Amino acid sequence: MIIYPMKYLSYFITNQLNDSWIELPLLKPHHIIQSRDIKRYFTGDLESPVESYPLFQGLEKHYLRAQIARITAATQISPRDYFVLDYHSNSYKWRKLNSFQSKVMSQKWIHEYAVNEEYNPLSVYDLLEPSNWVHHTPSITEKGVTQAWTNIIESGEDLQQKSGSIEYGCKIRMNLEIGRGDGDQLEIFRNLSNDAYMGEMPPWKFELTNRFDHTNSYATIRSNLWPGAHAVARENLLDYTYHGWGHKWGAFSFTVQPLSGYQLSNFYKDDIGMTTEMGDPTPEDELEYLAIVNKRKERRSRRKINALRPFSAADEDEERILNQHDYE
């Protein structure tokens, strides 16, 4: 079994066509895992931190790269038999290795595909059927990687050989682990008719660009799982586009993960013996405490009033005698 991450593609982005293009960083599995638990709008600043709960360990450029990988893995589709596996694209990399290394390298590069030169184009009416469309990109598992393995069936003579190259004509059976770690084994070109519904909504919507003139019409396939993702096809032409917020649609409203359970603190131990345990006050004790507080407030207010009391005639005589001063 070979596990290879979804980081073998490079993406360049820009806010405006006349600005410089910036390459996004390589994708890491934990970015995929954490991006599934949050929903956040993009600000356009790649270096801005992603403040969210649960925590996303990365900047906006890492979150953008993770969303691109998720959208690509779910919405890259093609007509049936449009692509075929390319077994010879990287043969030069492992042709001179021993048999064990050849097997490993062949398993690593077996996921590549190429346009089928013998493809028989389907009509626009046939392209409106989900059974005539397939996924040609690996799915992403719960661990944030695409997981695939190959079982190479060899003859008894090949099993006895300890070295040598693997012949190109050997039979290869491909199994691909699909979905979010459910363990189902399906063919690498998964049919769209097997995609799960989202509640009562189908995952795809098929329609024509021109309902009145079918001779010049194209078949468009819109993803309901990722709003904004479209595929357009006609005869030998195939193209994709995405124009959206980078959010995945759900049958239910988005809810944040609940907080983890409370952790009890360590029991306090009074080794010195300076701490005494007291009971909670009763309602009568609280009323008595409030009465004492009110009395203290009244005393303070009286002191302020006495301090501001004006001088009387007796006070003026005493001050005149002490200071020996005549006001007249």
Image (cartoon, helix red, strand yellow):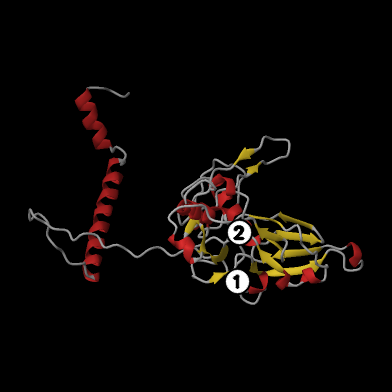
**Residues marked 1 and 2 touching at CB (< 8 Å):** no
For mark 1, does the 10 Å Cα neighbourhood hold few (<14), some (14 to 19), or many (20 or more) residues? few
How many numbered discs, if any? Answer: 2
Residue found 45% across the figure and 52% down from its top = 163
Is residue 26 or residue 317 the one in the foreground?
A: 26
Q: Is residue 201 left or right of residue 298?
A: right
Q: Which mark identifies residue 73? A: 2
Residue placed farthest to the left in the image? 272
Vertical relation: 29 (above or below) 44: below
Residue placed farthest to the front in the image? 157
Q: Position of residue 265 (x, y in %)?
A: 24, 60
Q: Secondary structure at mark 1?
A: loop
* Residue 52 visible in the current orientation: no
Amino acid beneath label 1 = Ala
* Residue 89 visible in the current orientation: yes
Q: Which mark identifies residue 251? A: 1
